Structures are given as C-alpha cells and as structure tokens.
Image (cartoon, helix red, strand yellow):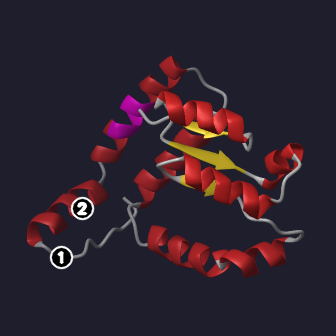
Amino acid sequence: MRLFMDTANIDEVRRGAAMGVISGVTTNPSLVAKEGIEYKDRVLEICEVVDGPISAEGIAQTADELVEEGEALDAAIAYAKKLARGPSVAIDLARHFIYKSLTSTAEEMYDYEGVAAVMSAMTEDAREGTQSFLDKRRPKYKGR
C-alpha cells in the first residue's frame, strides 16, 4: 500500500518524509493559500523534500483556462475513444463499482467485486479478449 499526504504544510511533509512513511504528496491551490506562500514556490519546495510522486493540481479561474493549460480536452476525447473500443460490459461494471463505493462499506464492495468479476468473465467480450491475446491481435469487442 502506498501512502500519500494531502497537504501544503512543509513541516508536515518534512516529518512524513523523515519517518519514511509517505510515498508522495498531493496538494492544491487552496491548501497552499492557507500557508501564505506562492503556489509555485511551495510545490518546488515539496519536490525538494519528497522522493516520490507529487500531484499539484492546476490553477485556473474557468474551465476554458484549465483545458487550455493542461490540454485536457484532447486527452479526454482520446481516452473516451479508447474506452469506447473496449469491453463495454466490464467498463460499465467498473463505472457502477466506482459510484457504489461512495456509499458502501468495504464488506459490501468485496461482495460486489465478486459478482462483477463473475459477470464480466461470462461475457463474449471476455472470451474475445483472451482469444485476441492468444492470437496476438487487437480484440474486436461487441458489448456482449
């Protein structure tokens, strides 16, 4: 299991890094603002302390600016097209799984995971995925 700190407090980051218990840090403009330091400066400071992944959320005032800064729209469209070519039953089960996890206990999620795995494995798409792998070709999913 990997543990990430969600903070912009550099003292907390240093303590976590010194104890060797954190894998990385996530932060965002709101957390940095509470620290009273420039965003870029704090992110760079965290990078100097942490030997691992750093997730620093983007800064934008509008959705258009955010897309422009991160070029997320093109990436989102490309990813959606990739998903559309995939095994739709398994993808739909995964989507339901994510939503269900917001309001369910771990025990309920373990049960749902077992059901979803069986349902997914019984589809034509699952068989096609395995066969295409063995044939060393791209799968042709049909959503069944």
Q: Main secondary structure of the magenta part?
A: helix
Q: Residue 72 in the image: x percent, y percent?
A: 65, 74
Q: Please tell me which residue is depicted at 73% across the width and 64% down the height of the picture.
A: 58
| 98 w.r.t. 71: above or below | above
Q: Please tell me which residue is depicted at 52% across the width and 21% down the height of the picture.
A: 106
Q: Residues within 10 Å of mark 2 (few under 14, many from 20)?
A: some
Q: Please tell me which residue is depicted at 44% across the width and 60% down the height of the picture.
A: 88
Question: Looking at the rendering, in which quadrant would you find the N terminus?
Answer: top left
Q: How many marks?
A: 2
* The image quarter in which residue 42 lies: bottom right
Q: Residue 37 in the image: x percent, y percent?
A: 84, 53
Q: Residue 25 in the image: x percent, y percent?
A: 59, 45
Amino acid identity at mark 1: Arg
Q: Residues within 10 Å of mark 1 (few under 14, many from 20)?
A: few
Q: For the residues marked 2 and 1, what is the alpha-carbon distance in whole angstroms? A: 10 Å
- Residue linked to disc 1: 137
Pick whichever, 129 or 16, lies toward us. Answer: 16
Left or right: 103, with 48 as reference point: right
Amino acid identity at mark 2: Gly
Of the two numbered discs 2 and 1 on the same chain, state the one appearing first in sequence: 2
Instruction: Classify mark 1: helix, strand or loop.
Output: loop
Left or right: 43, with 127 as reference point: right
Residue 126 lies within the magenta run:
no
Q: Residue 39 in the image: x percent, y percent?
A: 79, 59
Question: Looking at the rendering, in which quadrant would you find the C terminus?
Answer: bottom left
Pick whichever, 16 or 102, lies toward us. Answer: 16
Q: Please tell me which residue is depicted at 26% across the width and 71% down the height of the picture.
A: 139
Left or right: 98, with 134 as reference point: right
Magenta segment: 113-117
Pick whichever, 121 or 75, lies toward us. Answer: 75
Residue 116 lies within the magenta run:
yes
- Residue linked to disc 2: 129
